[in-house]
Image (tube, rainbow, N blue to C red):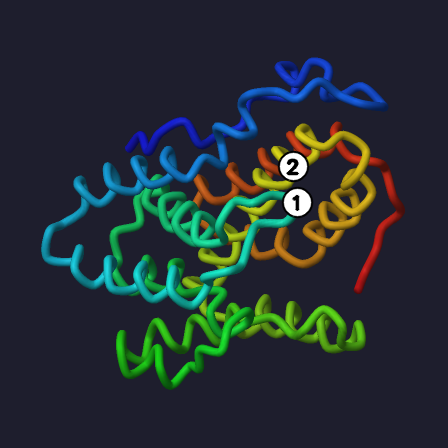
Amino acid sequence: MSIGPLEPPSVSEAGDALAPVAPRYLSWPEHFDTVSDVQAAWDRALATHPAADRPTLLRADALARERHEGQWRRGSRTPYWVHPVRVTMGLMQWGVTDPDLLVTALLHDLVEDTVTTPGEIRGAFGARPADLVVWLTAPDSGLAGDAVRGYYRRLLEQGPPDAHLVKIADRSDNLRSIQALVMRTGDRYRQWAGAYLNRTQWQVLPLAADAPSPARVALVSAMADLAPLVEPVGFTEP
């Protein structure tokens, strides 16, 4: 299913964005983040989805937009809600139709980044999305590294495959957004992006071993496309 022009170009099309200083601002990163484009793609995606599930997805989308109000994607004025919507459309592209998984994708950052509780999600959408969102809620990055390592170890060893799939979709979209950010801003975020890419190697890439092929390809492709754009850094853990 085509969801619109939301994929960054290949690295070979990056042009002056690979320059070490003051890269030319390219049009495509803004296009990638444009609210109207994401909304239009989301409308098209919903139109092809079973009608019986659309009201539930729209309720989840509305809750995510409400709770993420005032939050923005890093380094931009792109409202945060475009991220869960793109994660959901990514799952749809992989052939996912399970409404619980799509609701989970829309709500996956609510407990981690807003005042929303698992109980609220359970009451509004049922136990399965609520439980999956809990699995997808990582510890605060300011906590000791052991807590973060322990979370990803538990997710890999004990987490349900459905949580792995949503986490892969989440990280794939983050990597694509970071690719756009680096191409738009040059050196400013390159070192941070390199550290994020390295963390992805031990945090999320292992989850892809048993994931469906489209998910594996999406994650590895996003990692490969970002790699030439970032400042090389050593292997890092939190």
**Type of residue at label 1?**
Gly
**Badge 1: residue crowd in 10 Å (few <14, some 14–19, many ≥20):** few
Residue 217 left/right relative to 47: right
Answer whether labels 2 and 1 touch (C-beta < 8 Å): yes
Could you tell me which residue is drawn at 64 percent across and 40 percent down?
178
Q: Quadrant of residue 223?
A: top right
**Type of residue at label 2?**
Leu
According to the picture, the residue beneath numbered tag 1 turns out to be: 75
Q: Quadrant of residue 151?
A: bottom right
According to the picture, the residue beneath numbered tag 2 turns out to be: 181
- Residue situated furthest left in the rendering: 52
Q: Secondary structure at mark 1?
A: loop
Quarter the C terminus occupies: bottom right
Classify 40 as above or below 210: above
Q: Nearer the viewer, mark 2 or mark 1?
A: 1
Depth check, front residue: 23 or 52: 23
Q: How far across and down, in percent of the image, does residue 93 sit?
A: 35, 39
Q: Quadrant of residue 193?
A: top right
Tell me how far mark 2 sits from mark 1, CA to CA.
Answer: 7 Å
